[in-house]
Image (tube, rainbow, N blue to C red):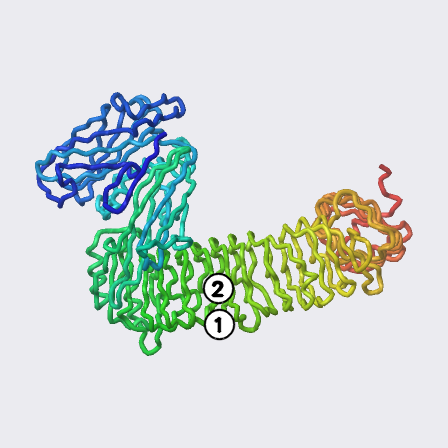
Amino acid sequence: MKRMRFMIGTGILVGLLGLWLGSCGNGFGPEQNGNDGTVYLYLSGVAGVDLPAQGNLRTLVPSDMDGQYYQLRFTPLEAGMEAVDAEANTSRFIIKLPAGTWNIAARGWHSKDDAEALPLLPLLRGVGQVTVKTAEVLNAQIVMYPLETGEGTLGYTIRFPGDTVSAFLRVYALPGIAAAEAEEEDETESADTDAVTGASQQNDAVTGATPTGQSAAATTLAAEPEETDPLPVALVDLLQGATREADGTLLKSGSLNLGSGFYRIALDLATDGPDGEAPSLLRKSEIAHIYDGTETPAAYTITADQFTPGKVFTTTADLKTWLAAQPENTADAPYMATLNGLDLSSSDTAALFDALSRYVALDLRGSTGGAEKKFAGLTEVEGWARGRYLVSLVLPDAIETIGNAAFLGCSSLHYLKLPGQLKAIGESAFRGCPFPSITLPAGLNAIGEGAFANCTGLREADLSFLTLTSLGTRAFQSCTALESAKLPTSGLPGKRLPEAVFGGCTALTAVSLSPGLETINGFIGCTALSSLELPLSLKTIEDFAFSGTALTPDLALLVNLETLGAQAFRDCTALRTVSLPASLKTIGKGAFQGCINLALAEIPESLADQIDRETFFACRLVQFKLGSAAPNPALVRTRDGLKTLVTMPSAAGDLILPEGIEKIADYCFYSYSSIGKLTLPDSLIEIGTLAFQSCRGLTLDALPPKLTTLGKGAFASCPSLSRLELPASIQSIGIEAFTTCSSLTLIIHAETPPSAGQSFTAYTDISIYVPDAKLDAYKTAGAEWVQVADRIKPISALPTS
């Protein structure tokens, strides 16, 4: 296939734009309504590009357009005019249209039969736009592009002004075929919703372009399009790695691999304009078509004269009136405005956001923060979602404080210049803002709780140069695109990294911690984080600190570590070994719960008594190495004078517990549903509370001969347990010890009825057999036995089978 190229800078779009329009010298003149004009539309293919067969459709050669079948739709941008549908089977089509501007969408099949049989599988698609004047004869041409599957490469070379402070290239997949069909059939859609400007008009005209990686056939199952702003499939920070040319301009080149289909390539640049003027901004977008196995070069040259100054206002009322009169626009084509004279610390701010009914880039440098030097933001605004129209913002340099929730709900805010004098950012100030980067001023010393939470476009958080007096919990929580973070080299307040500062940052891989840290939290759910250098100064790892990460730290090196919080390393499935330092004094509940690949836990003797069933719950591979002892799958400790089996996470299948154990700890095998036949040691004296509850596959014939105590709920919810003998030594049966053990036959050999609390009153189907000579003694032993007296029978009455 031949290469296709497109250039931007002179306004002429070649090849990739899929559109060339000529018109007797002035095809894009001003609108003149009243009479019809004649349009000669030429449908052309991409020379030398052959289409593969799709389904049962035959191969179409685009250079031979005649004899194919085409559906065309002409959509007016002016209100009050109807869309016009047409069809053709030749590459030259003539139509009369009323004066005005028309978007053109065309689809092509091999034949009309193919179109009727497989309407959602066009082979060709093209878009265009034409402006018709009074009694005009106009020539227009649409390049019909094939729809394919596979992957191609978009190469780009972008030259832009040297004073650019923010520059991004974003790539959006255009809507799928099924979505386009739905749009075309929607007769209630008003014509003025298409009245957008510039390249956005062309973008909206592309109906049915195939999304990334999807074939035309696949889109027949596509869901209805969401009514939210689309997310880019690729985003490039153009300032990263850009080179400076001799004339001062910046140059950035690169490439992106994209699935075959139509895309919108959007450029977003911002420069600092002169004082008192609007920020110099450019939002420019073009259409690209990616072919399977081809490289599509793109060259952009952006010069200073292509930047547009904003309109100046002195009241929010004037801004609101002006915006209301403008056509609907998109975030890629914001209106630009300078607003002077506002007191940003007052209710004026509420009125400002309420005025935004179109996408706007705002410059507020001519306003003030009042005596408080504060930007209050959206906190007092009812219906604060008005903030979604704010695309870009430059604040006055004198602002020192950004208030709580100031930009909450600004879901289109892609660029923000923070004041040079800024000292404090309030709680949730930028929660949910999508900007891909932000530059923090050097004087910033306070970041509130959740200040940047849910900023899903943010790629980097560099705090290294700051001196912070306050860093709030969850400051960067759920910034799912965040890849790297650098904490202040000057240290953190209280030598502590607060709770969930980076919680849920699933792309985070590189973190530079502050020196001297003694307490750490902050990384719960950072699933990509596999490497982190923990400081030797660390004393406390708080609850959930590294839960869900891919870390494999050598904790033995942390010679000052004293506290390991609850579930600190929960679900860290990359962990294979854990070696706890002797300095450790406290281990929280479930510290390593769910570390399913953990094979060895080295534990100092001084810490063994802090390990319980929860510490390594669900670590089914783990063996314990206490001090210098050999690894063992069972952790056994002397507690309350009894040799106690504390935990055995690997228990499964037919289980034989070792001789010498005198007690099974509370909850020891709780919910171990994979245990089958259980054999208990003769040394066993006590089974703790809920020790085997919910072991649904457990079977057991008899309890050991020395057993005296059966804890509360010890065998509750063990439905496979159908017959159990209790030894003559049994003295106590805990409450609900056999709850929901349906049709259980219980044989008790004790001469003296054991205490039973309310163990049997709820079991209407349990059968209890006791020594013949003690039958009456059991039936009258106490309230717990009297209530089930009708179910107590002599052992001699046991069925023989």
- Give the foreground label among 1 and 2: 1
Q: Amino acid at mark 1?
A: Thr
Label 1 Cα crowd, 10 Å radius (few <14 / some 14-19 / many 20+): some
Residue at x 89%, y 50% (from the top left corner): 771
Q: Quadrant of residue 555?
A: bottom right
Look at the picture and state if 32 lies above or below 513: above
Which numbered disc covers residue 438? none
Which numbered disc covers residue 467? 1
Q: Is residue 93 left or right of residue 59?
A: left
**Horizontal and vertical percent position of residue 684:** 85, 55
Residue furthest front in the image: 246
- Asked whether the beta carbons under mark 1 and mark 2 sit within 8 Å of each other, the answer is no
161 or 48: nearer the eye? 161
**Horizontal and vertical percent position of residue 207:** 30, 38
Q: Quadrant of the C terminus?
A: top right
- Of the two numbered discs 1 and 2 on the same chain, state the one appearing first in sequence: 1
Q: Is residue 737 visible?
A: no
Residue that carries the numbered disc 2 in the rendered image: 475
